[in-house]
Image: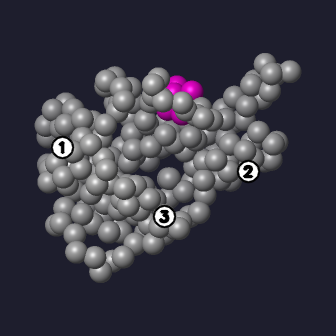
Amino acid sequence: MRQVGIYSGSFNPIHIGHLALANYLCEYSRFDEIWFMVTPSNPWKKQQALLPDDLRLKLVQLSVDGYSRFKASDFEFNLPKPSYTVNTLKALSIAYPDTSFSLIIGADNWVKFKQWLNAEQIMAEHQIYVFPRPDYPIDYNQQLPDTVHLLNTPLLNISSTFIRDAVKEGHDIRFFLHPNAWPPLVDYYNKLKDINH
């Protein structure tokens, strides 16, 4: 059975930190593929500084192109909103019965995982891989279910907020993103600047 890791997020925008983590997991773990699950904007929730859905998806597609074990996914775009992980995983399992889906999350999300909808069900039905995040150290000695795996992946302290702010301020930080993603991101902000002036 094909092993796929679901790396879900707003990817606002995707940057080399996201890509390096997923690359590491593909090369040093059991995954055949990792799907970057772009989370759609929630019409009932205020989305501050969230880039348009189609742009975020396009930047992911451009960034993963050429590496056969990465896939950009808009699967959640077609699910009822808000998007709950338990529902997404169930829908994925129905749509791809020949695939085993695991969840990849950061330590910041693991801290509040028990507050997620049907968290116990997710842990019972899927493998969960937790990677370290800045300011969220992982206790590797804690007792956890067999389905939860604590990772010791390289830590790249890069944030999408930093990238958005830098581009808006006119800084050339192209090396923080995949080369294919830099031009359309800059173009978006340039057009936004023209509209606002």
Q: Is residue 43 left or right of residue 156?
A: left
Q: Would you say residue 138 sits in the magenta stretch?
A: no
Residue found at x 73% / y 50%: 173
The front one of 192 and 100 is: 192
In the rendered structure, which segment of residues is drawn in magenta? 52-57
What residue does disc 2 label? 173
Q: Quadrant of residue 183?
A: top right
Spatial CA span between label 1 and label 2: 38 Å
Residue found at x 48% / y 64%: 133
Q: Residue furthest right?
A: 197
Nearest-to-viewer mark from 1 and 3: 3
The secondary element bearing badge 1 is classed as strand
Amino acid carrying mark 1 in the image: Thr
The front one of 112 and 185 is: 112
The front one of 110 and 181 is: 110
Residue found at x 32% / y 54%: 113
Q: Position of residue 40 (x, y in %)?
A: 44, 30
The secondary element bearing badge 2 is classed as loop
Q: Position of residue 35 (x, y in %)?
A: 36, 43
Q: Is residue 161 left or right of residue 2?
A: right
The secondary element bearing badge 3 is classed as loop
The C terminus, quarter of image:
top right
User: Above or below — where is 82 with respect to 98?
Assistant: above
Question: Counting other residues with Cα less than 10 Å from the Cα at mark 2, is it few (<14), some (14-19), or many (20 or more)?
Answer: few
What residue does disc 1 label? 99
User: Above or below — where is 79 with respect to 15?
Assistant: above
* Disc number for residue 133: 3
Amino acid carrying mark 2 in the image: Ile
Question: Counting other residues with Cα less than 10 Å from the Cα at mark 1, is it few (<14), some (14-19), or many (20 or more)?
Answer: some
Nearest-to-viewer mark from 2 and 3: 3
User: Above or below — where is 120 with respect to 50?
Assistant: below
